[in-house]
Image (spheres, grey):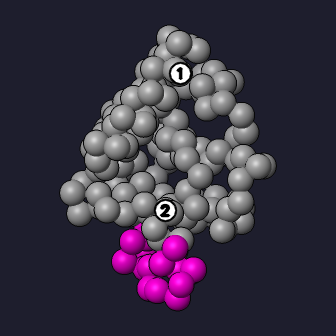
Amino acid sequence: MKKVAVFPGSFDPITLGHEAVVLRALSLFDEIIVAIGNNSQKKYMFDLKQRQTWIEETFKGIDKIRTDIYEGLTVNYCESIGAKYLLRGLRNQQDFEFERSIAQMNRDLNDEIETIFLFTDPEYSAINSTIVRDIHRHGGEVSQFLPKNIKI
């Protein structure tokens, strides 16, 4: 059976931390789907198609990685595409507590989908999309926090 993992997020924008987690997970799975969750109630800084393009460019040439867009519960999306794994990156204790609760709820919803946690590389532990957006919004330089292909 093919081991398919979903790496869900808003990726508004994708960061070096996201990129590193996906690349480190390549040896664990046959396919990784970087899935952009689209919540129509949420305001995003960057257009959905722009975020998808950035992800595609970030992982260009890596056949085991693809992107997709979904709405609704992540666990339902996993069911719909036959993915048995959720991939999540952890930067700190707060991430762990938050992600643990979500993983437990997902397990209650579908006990055939396993959440796999990878700790972020220490040099990326302070980077998150919210901070990157805030720096960008106030005119700061953010290129050092983003994959090389992203120019904002």
Tag 1–tag 2 contact (CB < 8 Å)? no
What kind of residue is marked 2?
Ser
Q: Position of residue 63 (x, y in %)?
A: 49, 47
User: Between 10 and 137, which is closer to the camera in this rendering?
Assistant: 137
What kind of residue is marked 1?
Asn
Dot 1 alpha-carbon crowd within 10 angstroms: few under 14, some 14 to 19, many 20 or more: many
Q: Say which element carries label 1.
A: helix
Please provide the residue range marked out in magenta. Answer: 134-152
Q: Does the magenta stretch include residue 40?
A: no
Dot 2 alpha-carbon crowd within 10 angstroms: few under 14, some 14 to 19, many 20 or more: some
Which quadrant is the C terminus positioned in? Answer: bottom right
Q: Say which element carries label 2.
A: helix
Quarter of the rendering containing residue 87: top left
The residue under label 2 is 129
Q: Residue at x 42, y 54 (%)?
A: 18
Q: Is residue 151 magenta?
A: yes
**Which residue reaches farthest left?**
122
The residue under label 1 is 106
Q: Position of residue 35 (x, y in %)?
A: 59, 44
